[in-house]
Each structure stands twice: as C-alpha cells, then as structure tokens.
Image (cartoon, grey):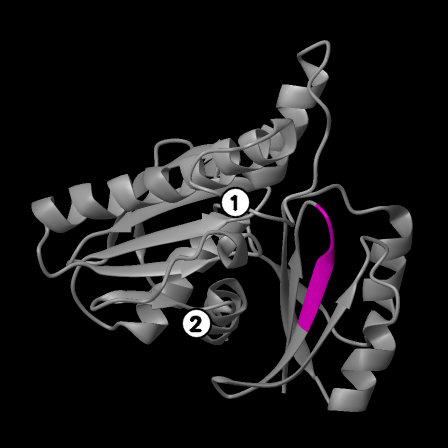
Amino acid sequence: MNLIIDIGNTRAKAFAFEGDRIADSMATDHRLTGLADFARRTGCTRGIYSSVAHIPEEGYEEMGRLGFALVQLTGETPVPVNIKYHTTETLGADRIAAIVGARTLQSEGYLLVIDSGTCITYEFLDSENNYLGGNIAPGLELRLRSMHEHTALLPLISAEGEVPEMGYDTETALRSGVVRGIKYEIEGYIRHFQQEYPQISVFLTGGDIKYLDMSPKSSIFVDDFIVPRGLNKILQYNE
C-alpha cells in the first residue's frame, strides 16, 4: 500500500493507494496530525509527499514515526514526463503531480490541466509527453480577500452564496464578480486551447471547482484526485 501526502496551502491530505486505486483517505493539518496512525491502519509501507506550504517541526516528527522513508517530490525528482520548465527549482510539486495525474487518466494526446485552489494553475502537456509550462493566477479566496484588504470599504465575504448574473447588492456584486470572472477565465483558456489543439483533453480539479458550475463536457473531465494520482504514479516510477 502506498502512502500519498499532498500538503497544500490550507490543509494536508493523505491517501492510501492500493495499486492505482484510492483505498482510504484523511484530511489533516500542516502538523500532519494522525498521519502515522493512518499509515499503520491502512498498511502503508512506502510513500511520497509534496508540499507547497511550510511544514512545521511537528510535521517532520510525524513523518519520522512512519517507520519508512518518504520520497519528497521536487522539480528534480524523476517523473514520467519530460520537464521543459526553465526553473525546475521553483516549480511547484503540486503542478508536476497534476500533469502526471492527468496523464495517468489520458495516456495520449495533448492535455490541459486546470487546478483551482488557493491559486489557479493552468498546465499544458503536449502529445510527446513534454511539459512545456503553465500559468498561475490568484484563486477565489485570494481575489475576495484582496478586494477587502486593498480597499477602504469593501467587506470580506464568503464564497458560499448566491451568484447572480449581475450582483444586486455589494455582497453578490463581489461574489459574482469573482466567481463568474474565474469561470469565464477558465472557459477562455479551454476555448483557446481547443482551437489550437482540437483533440486536447481538459482536466479540472481543485477545491474551488465546486463553486464554478463547470459541468463536464466532451473531452472535459472533472477529477478531485488528479494530484494524489500523479504522486502515486511518480512513487511507482521511482521504485
């Protein structure tokens, strides 16, 4: 059983993979509370982790209780795609994992992977398995928070709530502006890449996709587990 640890900006998630199948999962904090117990309960004997956040000392201590060493995914880790990014030392591990995860689901052709979390990332893989790079934009919460923090009067609002076509008060104006703006931005990326590469497969993932009403269409797939799938594949590749 493989232990897959995805440490994001707001929380961490652990998965137990049996082959390519997710057998169990848990959410935890950056201290990785309960990780060793989870690994013992699920029978994990090897693992990998990626992180886009600072791991406190308690987190490393919890990893030390596993009883086996973890592979740390970085821009220098061997992966089953060709990394053409110019600054691999600053390439986010979650971005690498997302591309590899999408390739495990679609074994050939062009891929566009859109991950909507704290930031929104757009990643492109060509038909010869070359990762040519991607773009990064602020995510939903960042946009809501920045409007509050960089103005005198605009309130900080929740992403939960009505999203009318045009806001009828300040709260709905802010929420609709951000949510619909992100939706139209993503649709614009998809439209552009579909025009350039008509057979491209598009994968949508990330915690904020649920707010965007992005219904799956032909060649557009929604998968909440692209990053852990990619981490699992990279661990298998490094055996």
Q: What's the magenta region?
A: 10-14
Seen from the viewer's position, the closer of residues 80 and 108 is 108
Tell me if residue 78 is in the magenta stretch. no
Identify which amino acid the numbered label 1 is placed on: Val
For the residue pair 85 and 183, the one nearer the viewer reads as 183
Residue that lies at the very extreme toward the front in this rendered image: 168
30 lies left or right of 146:
right
Where residue 98 appears, x then y in whole percent?
44, 58
Residue 7 at x, y = what percent? 68, 55
The quadrant holding residue 11 is: bottom right
Q: Earlier in the sequence, mark 2 or mark 1?
A: 1
Residue bearing the label numbered 2: 237
| Residue 78 in view in this figure | no
Give the side of residue 125 with respect to residue 235, left or right: left
- Can residue 13 be seen here? The reply is yes
**Dividing the picture into quarters, in which one does residue 144 lie?**
top right
Q: How many marks?
A: 2
As drawn, which residue projects farthest toward the top? 152
State left or right for residue 17 relative to residue 214.
Answer: right
Could you tell me which secondary element the residue under label 1 belongs to?
loop
Residues packed near mark 2 inside 10 Å, few (<14), some (14 to 19) or many (20 plus): few
Q: In the rendered view, would you say 156 is above or below 179?
A: above
Which residue occupies 11% across, 61% down? 199
Could you tell me residue 34's position as x and y percent?
87, 71
Q: Main secondary structure of the magenta part?
A: strand
Query: Residue 143: x percent and y percent?
Result: 58, 30
Tell me: residue 224, above or below residue 88. Answer: below
- Taking the spot 33% from the left edge, 74% from the top edge, the residue there is 105
Disc number for residue 171: none
Instruction: Determine whether the residue tagged by mark 2 lies in a helix, strand or loop.
Output: helix
Which circle marks residue 163 in the picture? 1
Q: Amino acid at mark 2?
A: Tyr
